[in-house]
Image (cartoon, rainbow, N blue to C red):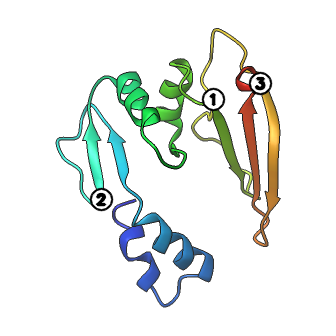
Amino acid sequence: MVDYWPTADTNPFAPEYVVEFARIWKNIPKIVFSKTLEQVAWNARLVRDNIAEEIAKLKEQPGKDMVLGGAGIASTFMQLGLIDEYALFVYPVILGSGTRLFPALDDTVNLRLVETRTFGSGVVFLRYRRADEEQ
């Protein structure tokens, strides 16, 4: 991401939705969870251990929702029970292989659909809330 998004909005060939996303994305503070990296750049900080403790601290702070990207880290967050909502973007492309989005879990996670949106590109956004988090 660091090789692309910080300057994506200056690319004269980038579609408008990429320019718009880049302008939003590059100003958002980021946390990189990694046991192998020694340092991170581009408006980010590194967390190497105690993921659940770090997320608990973040949830206590005022502000907007946290967004998580990447199947590997999402798997860890799912297994730790740290995900309240799932926001999925379904792209109109069929791949022959890839990384599993959801890991094998010991328990079922029941979800309730709370929002859908279809973009002009054909991408469909689906937002689910954990059914056990209903208020």
Q: Residue at x 76, y 26 (%)?
A: 134
Quick one: which residue is furthest to the front in this view? 62
The answer to whether residue 96 shows anywhere in this view is: no
Q: Residue at x 66, y 38 (%)?
A: 86
| Residue 129 image offset from top left, x and y in percent | 73, 34
- Front label number (2 vs 1): 2
Task: Compare marks 1 and 3 and give the one earlier in the sequence.
Answer: 1
**Residue 11 falls in which quadrant of the image?**
bottom left
- The one of 53 and 88 positioned closer to us in this rendering: 53
State whether residue 81 is above or below residue 3: above
Quick one: which residue is furthest to the bottom in this view? 12
| Residue 23 image offset from top left, x and y in percent | 47, 74
Give the Cα distance between marks 3 and 2: 34 Å
State whether residue 23 is above or below residue 71: below
Residue 43, which numbered label? 2
Are there few (<14), some (14-19), or many (20+) residues within 10 Å of tag 2? Answer: few
**Badge 3 is on which residue?**
131
The answer to whether residue 74 shows anywhere in this view is: yes
Residue 102, which numbered label? 1
- Total labels drawn: 3
Give the Cα distance between marks 1 and 3: 17 Å
Are there few (<14), some (14-19), or many (20+) residues within 10 Å of tag 1? Answer: few
Q: Amino acid at mark 3?
A: Ala
- The one of 52 and 109 positioned closer to us in this rendering: 52
